Amino acid sequence: MAKRSTRNKIRFQSIEALSDLKRAEIHLTQLAALADDTSPYINDNLPVIMLALSSVISALGSFDEGL
C-alpha cells in the first residue's frame, strides 16, 4: 500500500474538520427544535452560537479550496 503524502493528510484533516463542524451545526439545529422556544436561555444564546459556527464553516470552506 502506498504511503499517503503529507499534503493528502493535511487535506484529509481539513475535510474532516469541516464535516465535524457541519455535523455540530445539525446537532445545534436539532437542539433548537427540541427546545421548541420554551427556554429563554436557549433562545437568547443559541442563535449567536449558530451564527458564529456558520461563519467558521464558511471560513474553513474557503480555506479548504486553497489547500
Image: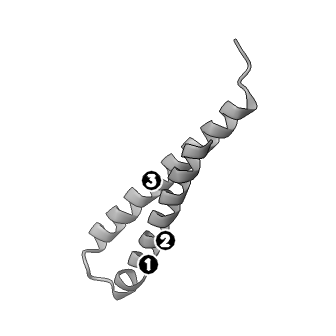
Q: Secondary structure at mark 3?
A: helix
Residue at the front extreme of this rendering: 66
Q: Which mark is residue 52?
A: 2
Q: Position of residue 12 (x, y in %)?
A: 61, 37
How many numbered callouts? Answer: 3
Q: Amino acid at mark 1?
A: Val
Q: Position of residue 44 (x, y in %)?
A: 38, 85
Q: Give the vertical position of 23 relative to 11 (above or below).
A: below
Question: For the point 74% across and 32% down, which residue is it?
Answer: 6
Q: Amino acid at mark 3?
A: Lys
Q: Which part of the image, by quadrant, shows the C terminus?
A: top right
**Which residue has dot 3 on it?**
22
Whether residues under marks 2 and 3 lie with C-beta atoms below 8 angstroms apart, the answer is: no
Q: Secondary structure at mark 2?
A: helix
Tell me which label, 3 or 1, sits earlier in the chain: 3
Mark 2 packing: few (<14 Cα in 10 Å), some, or many (20+)?
Answer: few
Q: Which mark is residue 48?
A: 1
Q: Which mark is residue 20?
A: none
Q: Which part of the image, by quadrant, shows the N terminus?
A: top right
- Report whether 14 appears left or right of 54: right
Whether residues under marks 1 and 2 lie with C-beta atoms below 8 angstroms apart, the answer is: yes
- Report whether 31 appears left or right of 63: left
Q: Position of residue 29 (x, y in %)?
A: 34, 64
Question: For the point 68% across and 39% down, which residue is it?
Answer: 10
Question: For the point 32% across and 70% down, which residue is it?
Answer: 32
